[in-house]
Image (cartoon, rainbow, N blue to C red):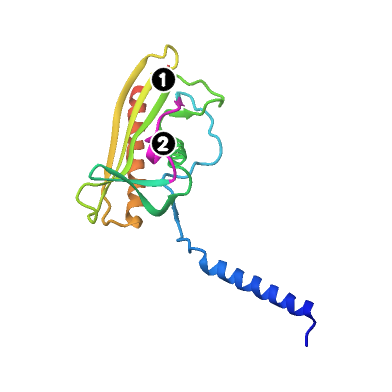
């Protein structure tokens, strides 16, 4: 016969083993979450201000509240929902800020976006408010939706704070299918299209001193 202490030890170990195995089998299986991003990557390095360029500082703008985080927002029949098992790699408002910087850096025009605290004189202040950043299901839940990006832009003079101009820019991109693999690239195209319009408008209004 085994000593009583040994038998007791074996019973305890067996009980712990069964308890652990029971915990493992009872844990819910988490579904994998796919991470996505939009916008061009921010270019490395700092470019020097060339003669004739116009410095524009970007003011802090607003962003559609329900879409500012890392969830993809959908609108169907007036109801707001979130796409399951999909996230932006970082909050959409952060990706938007990076996309704005990258788009201005990639443009070869005379307008240069200057970050706050960065050396250089800014003649204008640009504010961008993202009013809509969402997926619209206008033709039913199974049909291909429309990605809507709508932005209000306001340009003011840095000298007297006078309003130089304001305008609403909008891009609607309909993917070929109601799939995330098609919807996410549609976001990318919509953002690129809106920023192209914003940059073109800013270059028209921002006059060198």
Q: Quadrant of the C terminus?
A: top left
Question: Does residue 53 appear left or right of residue 19 in this picture?
Answer: left
Magenta stretch holds residue 7? no
Name which residue lies at 48% across and 63% down: 28
Between 19 and 137, which is closer to the camera in this rendering?
19
Determine crowd level at label 2: few under 14, some 14-19, many 20+ residues with C-alpha closer than 10 A: few
Q: Which residues are magenta?
A: 57-70
Q: Quadrant of the N terminus?
A: bottom right
Kindly tell me whether residue 207 is visible in this rendering: no
Determine crowd level at label 1: few under 14, some 14-19, many 20+ residues with C-alpha closer than 10 A: few
Which mark is on residue 175? Answer: none
Judging by the rendered image, the residue that carries numbered circle 1 is: 208
- The location of residue 201, given as percent across then percent down, is 32, 28
The quarter holding residue 161 reads: top left
- The location of residue 91, given as percent across then percent down, is 46, 42
Is the C-beta separation of discs 1 and 2 under 8 Å?
Answer: no
The quarter holding residue 102 reads: top left
Q: Residue furthest bottom?
A: 1
Between 137 and 3, which is closer to the camera in this rendering?
3
Give whichever of discs 1 and 2 has the lower sequence position.
Answer: 2
- The location of residue 11, given as percent across then percent down, is 69, 76
Q: Secondary structure at mark 1?
A: loop
Q: Is residue 10 above or below residue 171?
A: below
Between 105 and 79, which is closer to the camera in this rendering?
79
Name which residue lies at 45% across and 19% down: 123
- The location of residue 207, given as percent across then percent down, is 38, 20
Q: Is residue 155 above or below residue 192?
A: above
Which mark is on residue 107? Answer: 2
């Amino acid at each position: 016969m085994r000593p009583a202490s040994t038998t007791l030890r074996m019973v305890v170990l067996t009980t712990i083993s069964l308890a652990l195995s029971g915990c493992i089998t009872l844990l819910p299986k988490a579904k994998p979450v796919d991470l996505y991003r939009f916008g061009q990557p921010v270019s490395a390095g700092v470019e020097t201000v060339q003669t004739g360029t116009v410095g524009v500082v970007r003011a802090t703008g607003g962003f559609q509240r329900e879409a500012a985080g890392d969830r993809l927002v959908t609108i169907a029949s007036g109801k707001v929902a979130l796409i399951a098992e999909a996230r932006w790699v970082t909050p959409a408002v952060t990706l938007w800020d990076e996309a704005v910087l990258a788009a201005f850096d990639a443009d070869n025009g005379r307008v240069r976006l200057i970050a706050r605290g960065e050396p250089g004189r800014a003649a204008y202040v640009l504010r961008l408010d993202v009013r809509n950043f969402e997926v619209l299901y206008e033709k039913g839940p199974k049909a291909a939706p429309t990605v809507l990006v709508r932005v209000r832009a306001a340009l003011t003079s840095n000298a007297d704070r006078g309003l130089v101009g304001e305008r609403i820019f909008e891009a609607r991109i309909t993917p070929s299918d109601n799939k995330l693999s098609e919807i996410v690239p549609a976001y990318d195209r919509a953002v690129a299209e809106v920023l192209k319009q914003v940059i073109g408008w800013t270059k028209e209004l921002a006059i060198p001193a």
